Image: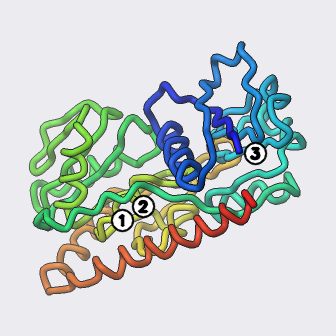
Amino acid sequence: MIVNLITNWTAKKGLMRDATLVAALLHAWGHATRAIQFTEVKQRADADLNVFLETVVPPCFAWAPRNWWIPNPEWASPESLTHLPAFELVWCKTREAHRLFGPLSEAARYVGFESEDRYDPTIERTHEVLHVAGNNILKGTESVVEAWAQNHGTLPPLTIVGDVLAPRAISGVTFLRDLPDEELRRLQNRCWIHLCPSEAEGWGHTIHEGLSVGARVIVTDAPPMSESRGAEPCLPARPFARRYLATLYQVRPGHIAEAVRDTRSRLEAGDGECDLTVRAMWEDARTAFRARLQEMLA
């Protein structure tokens, strides 16, 4: 089978990561894929199946007899929703996405998703904290920074990876940007505490990559962040806005500081065996997703 994967391949963000993961699975199962940049659709590319990742490009519908859409609720614009009848399958990555799209389309199905396996058991663990923001404004980075600013060096060392905020001189905080992938992988395995107080997520690669390494992943206690098996949804959140179909949630700096202190205390008390359990839960979720996807393709 030939599959067109239509999305924003050039942005080097979550969409490209989504498409790369889907392409790798399809290749492993014997299918051919074609990467289509959604802004460059002048030349027809006939296929057996079109898969649109977030972006919806109506001129491409005729390229294949079947069209699937993998939407992210926080980016599902009213214009894109007008094209729901064109899709044989609306592939929902989270239960929350299925809750939102189910009333809008009979084609909505919970399929799930997966993230890259980042595990490296050779790297020594520390009780440091990692927050990966990238250039995503919905990661709750401002609250993370404020938590450390308010606590004057009493929290564990924190590394923030991304460029959504300008670096500030705060005790115990290191700002990094444009990090090589191998260095990021080293940080993901070294830092035992991953802090992910996201306002919203289409899937949450930073959350699931943290689970893949067996880290203690602290997340917002609201869907879809709280759906992640193995994560610790211990950050109370309040809804404060909407972005297209998604509700945005805000976490207070004080709750972040409290959760980090509690997690560090449990680790220092010897509660360090759970990392293998967390990773096993991540592996089980990935296996279940792949089974559902193979069933859909069949």
Q: Which mark is residue 212?
A: 1
Q: Which amino acid does label 2 sit on?
A: His
The residue that disc 2 covers is 208
> Residue at 75% of width from left, 34% of height from top?
47
Label 1 crowd (10 A; few <14 / some 14-19 / many >=20): many
Label 2 crowd (10 A; few <14 / some 14-19 / many >=20): many
Above/below status of 210 relative to 10? below
Quadrant of image for the N terminus? top right
Quadrant of image for the C terminus? bottom right
Closest to the observer: 275 or 235?
275
Q: Position of residue 61 (x, y in %)?
A: 82, 31
Q: In what element is the residue under mark 2?
A: helix
Above/below status of 181 relative to 38? below
How was this image coloured? rainbow
Q: Where is residue 209 in the image (x, y as percent from the top left)?
A: 37, 58
> Residue at 64% of width from left, 25% of height from top?
38
| Cα distance between the residues tagged 1 and 2 | 6 Å
Closest to the observer: 122 or 205?
122
